[in-house]
């Protein structure tokens, strides 16, 4: 798909489809054509009066260069805010053109408000046209010939937004590719290679710890979780250093379980295939670094990926094993399927060692978060209100919703163990919270920490907003935004 900008008048605008996105407050476009103006005003009344419950499509009169006009209105989708609606309708308009062999789709954004929203349209178009096609005999190339024409007051300013959105969406779609891909391909070593590729293309520092180094450094969680797999565990860090020195060192820690069978506490077969996506946290922090490497925030950022495959085998860790972490804490492994927290613990300890001032971990951590929140909200917990609010705000800039769950010290009782300092599972209740309380035991002192449980949001079982089925790429844009707009996001 290509993007073009157009600064001229409506009469000379050439398009197969012209998309008009409406809202009661926002006026994204202005039309000099009277007939069309009337049509739009009529549609506006019908939408808000409830008489139109789907998009309105028609052939415009007196405009020879435009085949079809389609009008969307925010009243069509009341569940989401205007930005999300813009993206959803941009994706829908483009699909309408692509599916009806009318590949030249123009978006009317030729007002001041329109100019501000160019990035949203482009985001909707790029995220909405993604699908994982690699394994089909005949990959679908629905959007290949599409041209999205941005009708704007300022081609120059529109271009800036197009380029920025392209960076965000390329990284998000790369994150989705990693998560959609099979676990036979995306092994811990493959995540390491991905980090190395990013380091090379975006001038980042990369450091890889293999099994021997992990043993030396007593990274007992990674070693134990990876013990049963043919694919050895790794820890990899990918660092961005700003030009001017920064007091802030943000560590983005991602859970990279490349396949979670549950281990000896094996999972039921139903839906187990989705556990190839149990590295979605790792994929998100790598995606964020792809953006950060290009948008160059003023703070220091390190992505830390803890990668292992959780497989049952004669060499696997067993329920009842006890791990002694290098921060001195011992953990009783009551259930080998609660493996994410075991490897994140290593990552949290290491984040302290490399001088993190702020840590955000991202993990497909608990089924309990899915039961609590459904599929539209990522669970959010942490020890620092400013950081929690900053994550929420950064997510809000991209339509990624975070919902704070409680983290009461009172519930630490649930992760008590009779043989070790803590148990790796809690009781039958508050599973997302007890998992986070476990992590908190490993958060370095005086470090602001937020935990994102993306189990609810990493995967779409059916199309949602502008996403098709499969991996959503959640948190990559949020984490990049958190870093890029650090001052705004952390301001009160
Ligand atoms: N990777 C899973 C969590 C998960 C479940 C992610 C569904 C995405 C969708 C995690 O490792 C796990 O197995 N958690 C267990 C914890 C339990 C044993 C305490 C769970 O949630 O059931
Ligand atoms: Zn598990
Ligand atoms: Zn897992």
Image (spheres, rainbow, N blue to C red):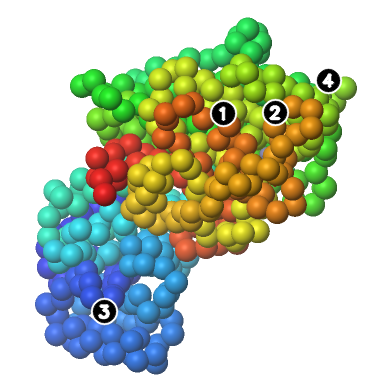
Q: Nearer the viewer, mark 1 or mark 3?
A: 1
Relative height, residue 426 to residue 104 (above, below): above
Q: Which label sits in the foreground, 3 or 2? A: 2
Q: Give coordinates of residue 434: x percent, y percent.
A: 64, 44
Residue 409: x and y in percent read 57, 44
Q: Mark 4 = which residue?
A: 315
* Mark-to-mark CA distance, 3 and 4: 63 Å
Mark 4 Cα within 10 Å, few/some/many (few <14, many 20+)? few
Mark closest to the chain's N terminus, 1 or 4:
4
* Label 2 secondary element: loop
The span from disc 1 to disc 3 (Cα, nearest Å) is 49 Å
Residue located 53% across and 53% down the image: 405
Q: Quadrant of residue 24?
A: bottom left
Q: Tag 3's secondary structure?
A: loop
In the rendered image, the vertical position of residue 73 relative to residue 198, given as above or below: below
Residue, disc 3: 24
Q: Which residue is mark 1?
A: 442
Mark earlier in primary sequence (3, 2):
3
The answer for how far apart the CA atoms under marks 1 and 4 are is 26 Å
Numbered disc in front, either 3 or 4: 4
Counting from the top left corner in percent of width and height, residue 480 is at 37, 39
Given this view, does label 1 or label 4 mark the residue nearer the observer? 1
Q: Earlier in the sequence, mark 4 or mark 2?
A: 4
């Amino acid at each position: 798909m290509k993007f073009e900008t157009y600064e001229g008048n409506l009469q000379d605008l050439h398009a197969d489809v012209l998309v008009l996105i409406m809202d009661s407050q926002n006026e994204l476009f202005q039309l000099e054509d009277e007939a069309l103006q009337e049509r739009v005003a009529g549609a506006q009344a019908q939408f808000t009066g409830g008489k139109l419950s789907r998009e309105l499509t028609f052939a415009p009169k007196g405009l020879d260069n435009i085949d079809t006009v389609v009008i969307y209105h925010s009243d069509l989708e009341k569940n989401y805010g205007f930005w999300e609606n813009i993206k959803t309708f941009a994706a829908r308009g483009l699909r309408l053109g692509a599916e009806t062999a009318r590949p030249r789709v123009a978006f009317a954004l030729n007002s001041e408000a329109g100019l501000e929203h160019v990035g949203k349209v482009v985001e909707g178009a790029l995220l909405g046209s993604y699908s994982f096609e690699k394994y089909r005999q005949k990959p679908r190339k629905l959007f290949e010939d599409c041209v999205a024409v941005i009708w704007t007051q300022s081609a120059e300013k529109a271009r800036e937004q197009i380029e920025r959105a392209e960076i965000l969406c390329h990284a998000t779609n790369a994150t989705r590719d990693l998560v959609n891909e099979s676990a036979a391909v995306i092994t811990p070593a493959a995540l390491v290679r991905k980090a190395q590729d990013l380091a090379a293309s975006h001038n980042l520092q990369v450091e890889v710890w293999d099994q021997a180094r992990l043993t030396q450094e007593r990274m007992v969680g990674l070693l134990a979780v990876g013990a049963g797999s043919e694919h050895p565990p790794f820890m990899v860090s990918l660092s961005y250093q700003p030009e001017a020195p920064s007091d802030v060192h943000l560590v983005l820690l991602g859970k990279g379980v490349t396949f979670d069978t549950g281990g000896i506490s094996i999972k039921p077969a139903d839906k187990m295939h989705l556990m190839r996506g149990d590295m979605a946290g790792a994929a998100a922090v790598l995606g964020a670094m792809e953006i950060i490497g290009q948008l160059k925030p003023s703070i220091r950022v390190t992505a830390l990926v803890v990668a292992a495959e959780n497989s049952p085998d004669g060499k696997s860790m067993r329920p009842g094993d006890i791990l002694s972490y290098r921060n001195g804490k011992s953990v009783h492994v009551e259930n080998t399927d609660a493996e994410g927290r075991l490897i994140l613990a290593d990552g949290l300890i290491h984040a302290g060692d490399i001088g993190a001032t702020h840590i955000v971990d991202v993990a497909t951590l608990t089924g309990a978060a899915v039961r609590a929140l459904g599929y539209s909200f990522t669970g959010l917990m942490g020890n620092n209100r400013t950081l929690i609010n900053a994550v929420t705000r950064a997510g809000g800039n991209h339509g990624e919703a975070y919902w704070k769950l409680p983290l009461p010290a009172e519930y630490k009782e649930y992760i008590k163990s009779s043989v070790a300092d803590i148990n790796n599972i809690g009781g039958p209740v508050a599973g997302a919270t007890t998992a986070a309380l476990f992590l908190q035991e490993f958060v370095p002192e005086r470090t602001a920490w937020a935990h994102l449980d993306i189990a609810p949001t990493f995967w779409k079982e059916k199309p949602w907003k502008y996403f098709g089925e499969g991996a959503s790429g959640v948190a990559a844009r949020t984490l990049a935004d958190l870093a890029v707009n650090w001052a705004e996001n952390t301001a009160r």
